[in-house]
Image (cartoon, rainbow, N blue to C red):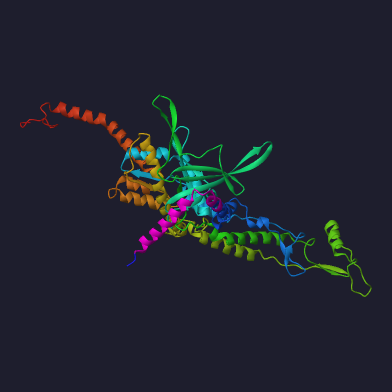
Amino acid sequence: MIDYGSETRRINAIINAGARTRMTDIRFLEKEIEKWKQSPVRRDMLLAERYYQGDHDILHQGRMVIGKDGKLEKAENLPDNRIVDNQYQKAVDQKKNYILSKPFTITSENDTYAVLLKKILNKKFMRSLKRVCGDSINGGIGYLYPYYNEQGELQFKRFNNYEIIPFWADEEHTELDCFGRPYQLDGYEGETEKTYEFFELYSRDGVDRYQLDGSRLIPDVMNPSGAHYLVEQNDPDGKHVEVPYNWERVPLIPFKRNAHEIPLIKCCKSLQDGINRMVSNFENNMCEDSRNTILILVNYDGTDLGEFRKNLSQYGAVKVRNDGSGSGGDVRTLTVEVNAENYRAILEIFKQALIENAKSYDAKDNRLTGDANQMHIQTIYQDIELDAQDMDSEYQAAFEDLLWFVDQYLASTGQGDFEQVEVDITFNRNILVNETELIDNCMKSVGFLPTKMILQKHPWVDDPDAALEMLEEEEQKKMEQMDPYQQAFAQAGQGNDPEGGGIDGGSEEG
């Protein structure tokens, strides 16, 4: 029997070994850069970012009519409104905030490790992670780059996903062999503003830096190749020197939307374009009046229709003639009736289809009105929750890679060796809840479940550890307030029974 798993790994190893031997070939890198710039993956990333920013295709398309040869041509004399109703941006924001608007929870058996992680994965990190989450939704994948700042602290920088060329070590895209980063910087050549292109290749051996001149790579003399980072140390003579170090792994952490890295724009672009067209066409039809709509002329006093249109637009009047045959001149409009209900119905169909295809939710759903129970709420959030579960699985794997860099940093700075310590990262969904129902369930769980577990489910608690600490402080204060009364009670008991016989000091004869 053939072990297809082993055979696949063997073939991949041969291919990747060949790729690594060619990786130093400048020509190979030049061809990979050109291929990446024209690739459908990068094109979808740029398209998604453009649509999120509100730059939709309809803004670059004029109103078209059928020309004299039967082909479509641009109409310059008709209302041409181009309206963007950006439902795509709304869907992206919903998904991003659903999983990351609340701080994630860090739990570990080692309290010291948990405190250190909260210090590193702080609000600044959350801001970067939220932007990476938007990248992974928009373009299918987002990237964080670990580095040391000037103070020697570990930081994480977001790289634009369309500026990263990943060279994967396996076909499942779980491990990076290396990655390239072509990017642009604006500068001056003399007094002329110019855009410069650069390329960096990151591997376990360090960073190779080049300047991109057209399609040719030239070593960057201003910023030469080197190690991942430098550490200041004292040499035997006591002088400060910078010692180069490399990470044992490729310093890039990919965050995927799903296993197939499918960008959201591929699921709903046509629906978003349909919404824009419907809204724009409706306004175009509403803007058409007697001065720019279709006219029927009877016995018109003139022959030039262009002159007729100009006079009508300028003076709002038209001169007709009577030919003496009893049939007087006339001007009538050919009216196309605009039914607003038809547009409203089509728009509703498009918007609901976009919500379903984007796996988001309708915040105006009728089931959320009144006293909605938790079952109704969960039904409305079912699609976005399914997508969030895929993202959660991918993000958990990404956090394993991220925590490896954190553990290396903590060990190198003498803060502790936590590489074997278990830690859980819990993403707290931003879901609408029936608070009364949840609080009631939490109250019923007291005595059956640990307090910390109950606090994790309570709708008012964001940080269970902080809430538990506050409860303990409150309990301690109650004990301290009760102390004087307990002491007075004990002293009173001793006064009634000096021999220690209890508060009942009466004799048998009494």
Question: Camera-side residue: 1 or 340?
Answer: 1
Task: Choose between 255 and 243: the one closer to the eye.
Answer: 243
Looking at the image, is 153 positioned above or below residue 283?
Answer: above
Which stretch did the figure color magenta?
3-31
Q: Is residue 115 something one can see in this rendering?
A: yes
Q: Position of residue 364 (x, y in %)?
A: 53, 56
7 is within the stretch colored magenta: yes
At a point 71% along the width and 67% down the height, the residue shown is 337
- Please identify the quadrant where the N terminus is shown: bottom left
| 221 lies left or right of 107 | right
> Quadrant of the image for the C terminus?
top left
Closest to the observer: 63 or 149? 149
Q: How many marks?
A: 0
Determine whether, in the image, residue 308 is placed left or right of residue 71: right
Which percent across, then down, holds residue 327? 89, 74
Location of residue 423 in the rendering, given as x and y in whole percent from the top left corner: 34, 45
- Residue sitting at the far bottom: 325
Seen as rendered, the residue at the extreme left is: 509
